Amino acid sequence: MGDPKVTKARSPCECGRISEVLSRVGDRWSTLVIYRLSDGRMRFNELKRQLGISQRMLSLTLRELERDGLVRREAFPTVPPRVDYELTPLGESLRVPIRALGKWALDNLDHIDAARASYDAGSDRRDGGAGEERGAA
Amino acid sequence: MGDPKVTKARSPCECGRISEVLSRVGDRWSTLVIYRLSDGRMRFNELKRQLGISQRMLSLTLRELERDGLVRREAFPTVPPRVDYELTPLGESLRVPIRALGKWALDNLDHIDAARASYDAGSDRRDGGAGEERGAA
DNA sequence: CAGGATCCCCCAAGATACTG
DNA sequence: CAGTATCTTGGGGGATCCTG
């Protein structure tokens, strides 16, 4: 029962297992959706707007999260359709580590930026080219 | 100075910032490298083998992590070159949330698998074709 | 409003080969 | 051993149009 999704990394340690889970719930959008949902249930377009995600990716991400039992979908058969998404108990349990990660992110963004600037300045040895090596167009 | 790397998602909330950090240290390999390094310093090939990562990705990942001030690189100019990698204090601070995430992953992998199986079984209604929609043998 | 279907681009990431 | 350089591909992910 090998998972075809996980590259095939047969690590001897637990990294393999972690890697599997990470490849499922560890991607950017999933993390952000969980994070956002940790504040409470929310509608589709609400999530879409707040996350700046395309409806396609949101749709896909939500379906995967629902499939993995992390998010629950509740649709109201009203005339203008309304669908709410909320964390399941399992999703709630992910909330803690995700929140911690989010907090760390907010707390250390500037540290990272500083480190980057420092690193870039250091490796800037004699590169007198006529431009940007990181096309910021 | 906008970061060209971050899609351009102009979210009104803090999600934008978190998203930035997540896109830096939140990817699969970075997370795994940090996780692995949280046990102590390690050599290049040691990491490579244990994570089942290609040398290219490991090299790239490590350089980014070093650039972001999360990992410190120490090279010994010996005849068979030896390079050790270890977490910086900043990296150590990431250790806690990463560890928490890793623990969650290990604790809930089977829950996720169960949820998946259940979901797939449920949405398997009236699909009497001979084809596999998900090539999982 | 929620989201499926399509088209398409581009880069993340693996494989391979070479070097100091 | 510890990388770097190069080539190639899969699929992540955006844009757009359409429907219930």
Image (cartoon, coloured by chain):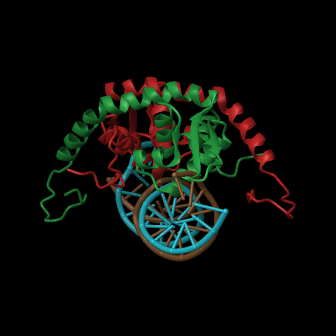
Chain colours: A red, B green, C cyan, D brown
* Closer to us: A15 or B3: A15
Rendered position, A91 above or below A14: above
> Percent position (x, y) of residue B96?
50, 24
Residue A79 visible in the displayed image? no
Quadrant position of the N terminus of chain B in the picture: top right
* Closer to us: A44 or A61: A61
Q: Which residue lies furthest to the front in this view?
A: B79
> Percent position (x, y) of residue C11?
58, 59
Residue at coordinates 53% horizontally, 57% vertically from top-left? B56
**Relative horizontal placement of residue B95, taking residue B3 as reference (left or right):** left
> Percent position (x, y) of residue A113?
72, 37
Residue B116 visible in the displayed image? yes
* Closer to us: B76 or B101: B76
Residue at coordinates 27% horizontally, 51% vertically from top-left? A3
**Relative horizontal placement of residue B27, taking residue A123 as reference (left or right):** left
**Relative horizontal placement of residue A124, taking residue A76 as reference (left or right):** right
The number of numbered discs placed on residues in the rendered structure image is 0
Residue at coordinates 64% horizontally, 45% vertically from top-left? B75
Rendered position, B84 above or below A92: below
* Closer to us: B61 or B22: B61
Rendered position, B17 above or below C15: above
Quadrant position of the C terminus of chain B in the picture: bottom left
Image quadrant where residue A104 sits: top right
**Relative horizontal placement of residue A135, taking residue B76 as reference (left or right):** right
Image quadrant where residue B67 sits: top right
